[in-house]
Image: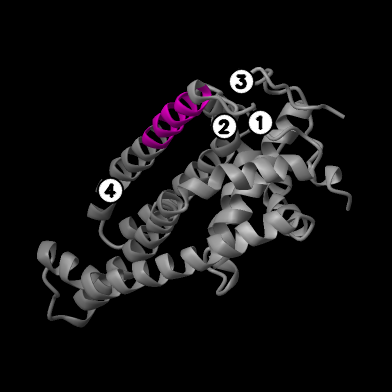
Amino acid sequence: MTPHSAVPAIAPSARLSDFFQGLGLLGRAFSLLFRSRRLFLLSLLCAAVTAVALVGLGWVLWSHAPGLLAGYWPLPESWYGRFGWYTVLVLSSLVVWVVGANVVPPLLLAPLQDPLSETTEAVVGGDEGPPFTLAGFIRGIVTGVAHTLARLFFLVVGLAILMPLHLIPGAGSVLWTVLGSLWTMTWMAGEFLAAPMTRHLYPFAEVRRMLRERRALCLGLGAGVYVLLWVPILNTFFLPLAIIAGTLLYRGLREARLLPPPPDGNPVALK
């Protein structure tokens, strides 16, 4: 696979098979990782920080999740009550761990996200973004913060809306976990597609439009990142792989002309 061929050829209209194309973006990202020394070194640094963050997050949940749940629902004495209590504890902790993994490492590694995305575009034959100016730098920070706050808002609101499902005896927690996972996958797709789009100063409305119009494609990317989080060792690379995959998706959408030219005035070289 040549570097440019890592960019997916996206069909002009949505289809169900887009899900598998989105899922395959992680494989394309992994292959591209070894085609640039800078991309590889940035990914190693991200992996080291992510490993520390994931271990720390796991320790916090292990130490404090049972006490937090017991504060709202004391551990029952009956065996079936205990079974339900531990089921809620495990399922809730899984979703919280995934959400935390997608909040804490990106916050710690925020300064490296743009260089990863820029290098990815350079490797596949595109531009590396607009030339540096103080005004552009400040505008990029403002746009990035706005995107991050908007994405976190939608994540929290979605999970909060689903929270009452826990009140349904038995199946409620399972249903909340399934729907919460699907919502988190969709949020992940928006998170990592927004990385290159923020750098090119697209409004967040364009990210939402892609999530809506190419739902299966974006959900495939989110599902791939979600699954990657559960693979030991490889999960430390989830952030750089997700950013690279999101950048490849962005380039694919641009080359399919599903996105308008970037507002930063630097059109991606289409091939």
Secondary structure type for disc 2: helix
Report the label total.
4
Q: CA distance from mark 4 to mark 1?
A: 41 Å
Q: Is residue 255 above or below residue 236?
A: above
User: Can you give x and y, in whole percent of width and height, for residue 195 in the image?
Assistant: 55, 38
- Alpha carbon of mark 4 to alpha carbon of mark 3: how far? 40 Å
Residue 85 is left or right of residue 30, and the answer is left
Q: Which residue is mark 2?
A: 199
Q: Which mark is residue 163?
A: 4
Of the image marks 2 and 1, the number of the one nearer the N terminus: 1
Report the span colored magenta.
136-149
User: Where residue 129 is drawn, which disc sits there?
Assistant: 1
Amino acid type for the residue under numbered disc 2: Arg
Amino acid type of the residue that numbered disc 3 sits on in the rendered structure: Asp
Instruction: Check disc 1: other Cα within 10 Å, few if <14, some if 14-19, many if 20+.
Output: many
Neighbour class for label 4 at 10 Å: few (<14), some, many (≥20)? Answer: some
